[in-house]
Amino acid sequence: MNINQEIKRSTLLLDNREAIVSETDKEGKYLKRIFISGLMSLLLIFVIIFTLPSTVLSVKSLVEYATIVSLVIFLFVLLIRYFTILLLAYLYINQYTFKSTTGFYPFVSIIVPVYNEDKVVADSVKSLLDLNYSNYEIIVVNDGSTDKTKEVAEQLVGYQKGRYSDVKVSLIDKPNGGKSKALNAGIRYSKAEIVLCMDGDSQLSPDSVRLAVRHFVNPEIGAVAGNVKVMNRGKFYTDLQALEYIEGLNMARSAQSFTRLVNIIPGPLGLFRKKAVEEAGFYSSDTFAEDADLTLKILANGWKIYYEPNSISYTEAPEKLHQLLKQRYRWTRGILQSIRKHRNIMVNPTINFGDTIILWTMFYEALIWPVMNIMANVFFMVAALAFGFTSLIFFWWAGLALLDLITALYCIAVEKEEFRLVWYAIVYRMFFILVIDICKAMSTVEEFLGIKMAWGKLERVGVAKA
Amino acid sequence: MELIPILSTIILVATISTFILAIGAYILYKIRESKGQQVSAPVPSTIRAELLTPAEMQMEMQQPEQKIAPQPIYIEPQPVPVYQQRPVYVQQPLQQRAPMGPQYVAQPRQYAEAGYGDPKSYQQSKGDSKFLKYTSEGYVTPAKEEKTSGALKWK
């Protein structure tokens, strides 16, 4: 209910400049690079084939040894990866459990960028009015929507009745320019010390702000990442994504949080110290993963980033395969763009050692791991079809499924999530992860080829209810 | 037929199908996306946006130092301490709690109020049997049996 319906309209002049990487003959440059790399590889293969008979090894034994060594390396990397993440996540959860709360409750500006979200924007703002926090305002930024988002958002402007106090709701209506510019407009307009950036279709849990802001009492913390959960469950793909968010994303984030080096602050919920965002130069439009890019910039400036598992944002996940591929295509290319943008830190650990480690981890997760997984599956398929080793693929699947089941069980217990999601771990590795990894590999190839891409917009069905 | 070869065949077929599905879906996605490609227009260095705020907020913006109260305005209540060393204190309501001291626990009246009975009567009844026997006439104190009588008893 509005307390004050008198609305003032004024004009804002927003900075619209953006740093764009030169696109001049980018595709040609990469094609040339790939062509030369291919030629060099062919040359190397010919050298090996012609010089091999003069050594003690034969081609057959070389292939056998290479296969065995590759498999051992793959298994070793897989187990090290799993157990490192599990151990760090466990240490983080232990540390988190025994941490006391503080009485630090600064003023927070909640920035809600919306683009064609007329079905869900009202529910999102209503969920924000129910926050267990009193010292905050809401700034809705309409990024040139073509539907009725502006009209719906205008109805929300005013002093709204919150749980503890009246909450100011403002609207910035700007021409379309992308999510990063919409968020920048809101952050620049805000006068708060802490800004919360979220998605227009996300809904926050009542304690999300109260629990997240307490970490800013530590002056080294530049941002706090929230916990994203899938809202529209009950369908095959969304349930698999719900498990992925819990097992794949949140557990990794917990592990990173142990070292205060979270590599991606998720779009649906991230709290930033405004000073850290200003130092980092706000969100950039030159990558398709603006959240990853800003996180890396904040880390590069020496700030620490923490993860708050009880600060929850519920978001709509893609329900159809092509929507899921669209999302993952953008994520993969965006992360690769961010890594490329910060490659000087990647190759020079003296600038920021923590950031270097994080970049290599991202590179491994985005590029090396998917390729390794695909190659392992191809190997087992070839072994079964060409050499009749059919049982190998079963033991491979059984081992991975068992590992996934145990991890899923642990993660679901830690997050007090739905137990029924554990059973999706059986098909998680062999179906879901394989589809995602193939999409990642294809996207990587496109990124290296420099093929132009556009922002994908997920069609909202409006399941969000406050 | 053994179970492992059957499961292996199922896994193999599922993996091959997933491969085909993933590659096919990706190609279809790219075809779908290529149809909706738009040419991006050049962007100006500054853009105008409309700001809608409540009237009071505009006035506050002219005096930004009055807008935000940086000091915390919500303080979480501190947990009430629970004295676990003396259980008698925990059971009592907070208002009735007497000042802590060793003499408080030792007072005999406190035992009486708590329903333990007078210490004297407790000592007098010490010799009585703790158990009563239920008969058709109600509860009666069981008579002491001669264990050395030698009579055989069936239970």
Image (cartoon, rainbow, N blue to C red):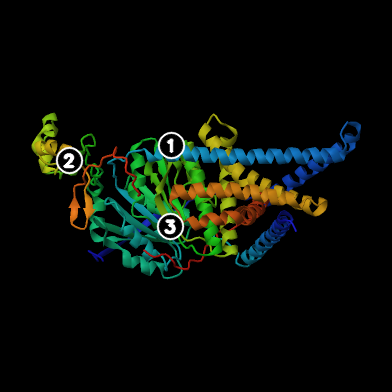
Residue identified by numbered label 3? A314
Task: Name the spot of residue A46 as percent of width and height, x first.
Answer: 86, 40
Q: Is residue B16 left or right of residue A81?
A: right
Q: Label 1's element?
A: loop
Of the residues tagged 1 and 2, which is closer to the observer?
A: 2
At 45% from the left edge and 34% from the top edge, which residue is drawn?
A: A302
Q: Do badges 2 and 3 share one subunit?
A: no
Same chain, labels 1 and 2: no
From the image, tell me which residue sits under label 2. B128
Instruction: Please provide percent x and percent y for residue A298.
Output: 46, 40
Which residue does the numbered mark 1 point to in the structure image? A303
- Horizontal side of A58 relative to B124 (left or right) equals right
Q: Secondary structure at mark 3?
A: strand
Assess disc 3: are there few (<14), some (14-19) or many (≥20) residues with their C-alpha within 10 Å of its C-alpha: many
Given residues A30 and A292, the one toward you in this image is A292
Measuring from the top left, give residue A179's x and y in whole percent.
47, 56
What is the distance, in whole Å, between disc 3 and disc 1 at their CAs?
Answer: 27 Å
User: Is residue B20 at all visible to an observer of this figure?
Assistant: yes
Name the residue nearer the viewer: B75 or B79.
B79
Q: Amino acid at mark 1?
A: Trp
